Structures are given as structure tokens and as C-alpha cells.
Image (spheres, rainbow, N blue to C red):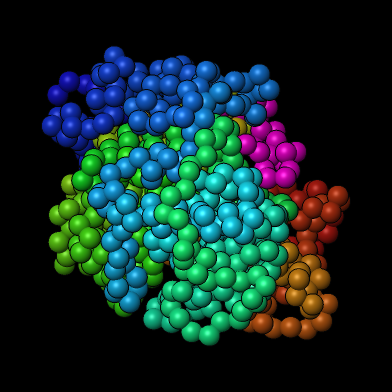
Amino acid sequence: MERILGDVDGEKAGAGRDAVIWSPSREWIERTNIYRFMRTLGFSRLDEFLRFSTANLETFWDAMVKEAGIEWFQPYTAVLDCSAGPEWARWFSGGKLNIAHNCLDRHDGSRVACIQESEDGSARTVTFGQLRRDTNRLANGLRSLGLREGDRVALVMPMTPEILSALYACFKLGLIVVPIFAGFGAGAIASRLADSGARAVLTADFLERRGRRLPLKQKVDEAGGAEHVIVLRYRGGEIPWNPKRDVWWDELAAGQSEECATLALDSEARAMILYTSGTTGKPKGAVHTHAGALAQTSKEIRLAFDHQPEDRFFWLSDIGWMMGPWSILGNHNFGGTIVLYDGAPDYPDANRLWRVVERRRVTTLGVSPTAIRMLMRRGSDPRAHDLSSLRLLGSTGEPWDETSYRWFFDNAGGRRCPILNISGGTEIIGCFLMPQPIQPLKPCTLGGPAPGMAVEVFDDSGRPVRGATGYLVCTKPAPSMTRGVWGDPARYIESYWSRFPGVWFHGDWASVDEDGYWFLHGRADESMNVAGRKVGPAEIEQALVAHPSVSEAAVIGVPDELTGEAIVAFVVLKKPVSPEELSAHLVATLGPTFRPREIRVVAELPKTQSGKVVRRLMRQKYLGQPLADVSTVENPRALEW
């Protein structure tokens, strides 16, 4: 076979991470979108194409938005403007567009936009025509509440088709969407509503998980802060009601026109604020634009996930995780069909996920490694189901272990479907690393840099390194990089651009092996990755200190076979309280995902002379590892547990 892969053309066989476990055939390669796009640009080798895409950013991205078929109300006059520095790059200057036009308005109304299944087995199919009518009625209803361009609107929703009409209604009007994980506790929701200044919240009466009805509107009420709360009738039942603020979704939309003009917005117009956590302070609001988000998500669905008109794309996600908006925008730009599932993937049994794939004839399935580990433990058997519709598998959120990766590859994909293990972040609503469907794969690999992403692995001195673990960085801007931290530009620079000036520092450990395959090895900062959800220690510590019995708190992340990392908390008390009560308090504030493995009561926290808690040393002590330099610790006895 003609070499088209270049630096990642390895053919090693055998066991372990050095083995190539999947290789594309010539026929497979020639059918892919990326192969045809490469040939259009004059490339026959993947490595040469990738180098071109980062050496010539403006040429590449100009070609890419044309390949993605993105339509503009007014064409852009310049692809990239770095006059204010790479940190504040502007993209597609002079252009006007709208995500809602590209992902909704222009598509054939008879095409299926969404197939949704709920935990109770009920299902809905929504066409683009139906979605367009629902979106326009909702948009007119939101306008009737006095919401105007630039206002923030939060979504705290189950995974129902109404999420789509909510997103597109906001985009049409130039409102900025703030997706929030519905599983968060009231405290976590409140902090995001307050930080974003959301004027309205779209929510539902209840959630349903594992056959239990869970309050959602009530939790939004406890969070407070919004002028308007629009409530979907989802599961029914008595809920608290404030007639001066609350309105039923169907009543707001009733009688509204099915026509609503879509605003032509500047390419840099804000579309979404997606929240992620850092090591210090409150959660960070990553600000995404109409042009940047659409260009990045469309590129990834088109090239890496090889979008085809007949595809049915299902990523097990919620709207509060970036993979929710990512899946929707990337597929709907092409008029594609997405599958939404609202429920637990192992309810009523461990084969529920595979039944969804089988019933809905899913072609692309994306999951987190934690979900696969959970299903393995529950005795799930994908091979008992007809999964022949699957063509591609996807994963993201956390590093894989080889056992779980191979189980997914062998059992769900039948050793015929490549696992496109991708990684980027909320901050870029896209990927730094992603395999391409025309390259061989080793277990757990992320392939290499995504097209148009100038990714490197740096050592401590800021030099590229191979064959050793270093820091994942990006040396040039990309269209979907956050336009700052919402309301805090200084924090944005400190978080992402200060470690290596002029270079994006992502906070992940990465390595490139001798064959050119890239791997990730967890967080390089103190953030934790619990079941694919990044959370900073500060948010958990603040929630603990909010309890009247807690004086101080410090949390660390430790390895966990199921969730990747688990939370361990250390607290200094003002007055006696049980760890069980503190754990319940934390769950009520942040949600059950962040239930700690252990809470330890200590007399004091180890700190430097400047008062900084030395979490790295605490983690080493907890795991029984040799302690690093303790000379800067003012109270080393605090490490003697």
C-alpha cells in the first residue's frame, strides 16, 4: 500500500501499547473525507498535510471553512488578526454569520435532526422542519420577555430535543448560552449563574435517573439569581412556583409566530460561555464565538469523525459538558442526525447502552473511559447485541487504561471500528489531539495533533521533547480558543499564557513515542478529573468551608479504578461534625459526581511560609510515595498522619 501516513505509519504487531491494533484498508482510506480534502490541497501523506495545516494557518482555515460548507451573511476579509498578540487573536474578521443559520435554517426540513430516547423507554424523532418551528416560537417567546442580544441565558436541562430549540433560539437572537450540568448541586449552579450574570434559565420540572424522579426546578430555585425561569413539563408533579418569575415553556411558546429572523452576527460575537474549573478560585467561564466554535466543531466532525449523510451520531454526554454542544454543532452544520439519551447508561441493566445503539442504528458512538469501566464491572455484554451499524468509536474526558480500551475495541467495535480517542478542552470547544481515520492505532493513543492545531510537548525549559513526558502546549492560536475568562481577562492570561509566554499551556502531561504516537498521562496541575469531569480543588474546598463546622479544607485527587481519579478531603474543624455529614453537604452543593472517597479530620494543613497549601506533598503522603522537598513547608508536622 502506498505510504500516505508518514511519521505514524507504524505496523508493529504483538501485545501492549507498542502494538498496532487497527489499520485502515486502502478502500477505507479512499472513502474518507480527510483523504479527499488532503488530495484537493495537493497532499498524499498525512504528516505533510498536518505540517502544512499549522505552518500555514490562514490558508488551512480558509480552506477548512469552505470544506465545511459554512455560509456567511457577509464574507470575511481576513482569516487571522494577531495584532493584539496570540492571546487575543481574532478570526474571520469582517465576516458575519450565525450558528443557527448554518445548523438549522438552511437544512431540508424533512431530514431527521434528532432521535431522542429517555430512560423510561419513550422515544422521539424530530426533523429539521419541526425543530425550526419549535425554535422560532421559543425565540419569539424569549424576545417577549425582553431578552436582547448579548444577554446570557443558562440551560439546566435533561437531554431532550428541547435543548436543541433552546440553543438555536438563543443563537438566532444573539443571546449567549450558558450550558450547566443538570446533575450539579444548587451551589455549583448558583456560582455559574452569578458569574455569567444569566438573566434567564431554561430548565425542566424534574430529572429522571435509575427510575427515580429528581427535583430540577427546585434546585434551580435554590440556586436563585435569574429574572426569568422557563420550565419544561418533562416528568410532571408538584413544583415550587413564582408567578412573577416562572413561566411554562409551552405557554411561553404558545401563539408565537413560526417565523423568526436570524441575526447576522459578527464572526467574534459571543455564542456560549462554557464553565471549567481551575486550581484556584471560582470556575472559569470559557467564552466561545459563533465563527470559532462552528469552524472547530465542523472540522472535527468532517475530518476525524468522517461525517457521512446517513450517519447517526451518539455521544453519551449532557449539555453541561462541552461534548454536548460539540456534538450538536458539528453534526448539524452538515444536516446530520444526532442521538440523545437522557438516563443512566446501565439502567435498568448493564446492556442499556448497547440496546440504544442497536435500536437507533448508531454509526458513531462516543463514551468516556469511566463509562466503559463501569459497564465492564456490571458484566455488560455488547456482543449480545447487533452493533453492525457502528463504523467509528470515540472517547474523551480522561486517559484510558489499556484493559478497558481493548475491551471497548474488541467487544463494542468487534475489532473493526477504530477508537478515535480525542482530547482538547472546554476552553477550546474542540481538540488539540485526535487520531485521523486513515492512520493505524495503538492502544490508548490520541494519534497526534489535530489539523490546524500547532501542538507540542515541552519540557520545563520550554523545549520540545520526545520519548519523555512533558507539558501539552499549543504554540499558535486556533479559531475556537476561548476569548478570555468571562469577566476576568487577567485570570485568562495567568491560567493559559503565563507558563510559557506566547504559548497556550493546557495543563496536561503528554508524550510522543518513538513511532510518533501521542499519549496523555493526566493533569500536570492540581485539577482533578473525576469520571471525565475536570474540577479544581478550590471549588470543592470552598464548598466544604461553607459548612459551619469547617475552618479550613484541602482536597487532592488520587487514582481510582472506576472514575480515573477520586477526591480525598482534609478538613480542620471549628466544632465536631462527622465525615458522613460533610460528604452529604458536598453532594448537596456540587452534586453526586463529586462525592469524596474519604474525608479526614486533621489538626492543621501543611503550608508554605506564604500560606499556600502543599497539595502535591499531601498527595504523595496519602499514596505512600517518597516526599519531594519539604524545606519550604512551614509546619512539616502537619504531614505526619
Residue 577: quadrant of the picture = bottom right
In this rendered view, identify the residue nearer to me: 540 or 610: 540
In this rendered view, identify the residue nearer to me: 157 or 582: 157
Residue 533 appears at what percent x and percent y? 52, 57
Residue at image x 57%, y 44%? 174
Q: Is residue 1 above or below residue 533?
A: above
Quarter placement of the C terminus: bottom right
Residue 65 appears at what percent x and percent y? 40, 28
Q: Is residue 224 above or below residue 630?
A: below
Q: Is residue 412 above or below residue 455?
A: below
Residue at image x 48%, y 38%? 98
> Is 269 covered by the magenta stretch?
no
Q: Which residues are magenta?
A: 475-503
Q: Is residue 178 left or right of residue 636?
A: left
Q: Is residue 520 visible?
A: no
Magenta segment, prevailing SS (helix, strand or loop)? loop
Quarter placement of the N terminus: top left
Residue 249 appears at what percent x and percent y? 50, 67
Residue at image x 43%, y 21%? 62
Q: Is residue 498 left or right of residue 605?
A: left
Q: Is residue 381 left or right of residue 210?
A: left
Residue at image x 38%, y 51%? 132
Residue 472 appears at what percent x and percent y? 53, 36
In this rendered view, identify the residue nearer to me: 315 or 448: 315
Q: Is residue 438 left or right of residue 455?
A: left
